[in-house]
Amino acid sequence: MLACLVCGGCFEKLCSLVNRKTVNRCPNCGLRRLDPFPDETEWRHLYNRKEYYSENLHELHKDLVFGYDEKKAIIQCYKNHLQHIKSAYPPPARLLEIGCASGVFLDLAQKAGYEVSGIEVNKYAAEYATHHFGLKVSNSMLEEANLPANAYDIVVAFDVIEHVVDPNTFINKIKRLLRKGGITVIGTPNTDSSLHRLAEFLARASFGIIQYPLFRFYGWGKQHLHLFNPHSLNHLLASYHFEPIGKYDYGIPFENICDLKGPYRLGVRLLWGRPYEFTVLARLKSEEVTA
Ligand SMILES: [Zn+2]
């Protein structure tokens, strides 16, 4: 069994998913890991398709378009992120978003006074953000992006770190992009949330018969390779000289995430309302010299 990338602990098997993937847990820090990982071709295929935002993610992205309705719950969710960022690091400042999708959050941040740019792995979404919002977006993975070092005050990544193959490389790259004293803002599903606890309990107690909720926590059993809790994410960030300066809970609104129909939809609706994701705000310690 592989060692935990956060604390070096030894993963233990929790349960199997129907697609032959295994959910593992580090008993020390709580990090979850989905095995086996996709190979590089498979990984790129997952995110580079034109259909990525119109199939499973249609409910989420139908509201994240040019001319968006500010009253929509998902826009309110983005505004909530922005309010926390403004409290921690008010504009003017240089803000980079990793995984900016169609560019709605960057558009909101730009309107709030930030100098913004983005990275997006899906070329169709990157083109949308460039053409419709006029944003500076580079179409690449963070690890491959040709971006200036020590150049940003704020690097944000919402619902991204759970998708990446190597979170250590991911955080190290963020560290290199930030200037000293800059902050990173990372949002991701929370394994300590009541919804995740319930999903994991149902899958294990039913010997895998009731596994749809857990399947969704892992991005249809294939997209989310690591799931964190605040402890494991802060532990990872501390390894790269970040100190926590804030944390808040959130969740993508029900109507933007639930693709179930009929009575199942009603059942999930009744359970909804508790945040199942969290965001950590962390500052790169100023005495650390980035290279
Ligand atoms: Zn661990």
Image: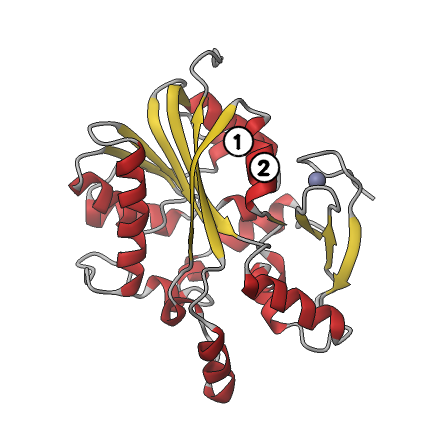
One can see residue 148 in this view? no
Depth check: 41 or 43 in front?
43
Q: Is residue 105 above or below residue 198?
A: above
Q: Is residue 96 left or right of residue 69?
A: right
- Quarter-of-image position of residue 138: top left
Q: Is residue 150 left or right of residue 1?
A: left
Report which residue position mark 2 lands on.
167
Q: Position of residue 205 (x, y in %)?
A: 75, 73
49 versus 274 height, above or below: above
List x then y, in percent, for residue 94. 27, 28
Residue at the image point whose x is 59% and y is 49% from the top: 43
Residue at the farthest bottom position:
263
The image quadrant where one finds ligand 1 is top right
Q: Amino acid at mark 2?
A: Pro
Write down the residue under mark 1. Answer: 171
Instruction: Name the residue nearer the viewer: 89 or 105.
Output: 89
Residue 241 rendering spot, x and y as whole percentages: 53, 22
Element under disc 2: helix
Q: Residue at x 59, y 55 (%)?
A: 191
Question: Would residue 77 be seen by someone viewing this image from the given angle?
Answer: yes
Task: For the residues labelled 2 and 1, say whether their Cβ atoms are less than 8 Å apart.
Answer: yes
Q: Amino acid at mark 1?
A: Ile
Q: Is residue 102 left or right of residue 108?
A: right
Mark 2 Cα-neighbour bin, 10 Å: few <14, some 14–19, many ≥20: many
Q: Which quarter of the figure has residue 218?
A: bottom right
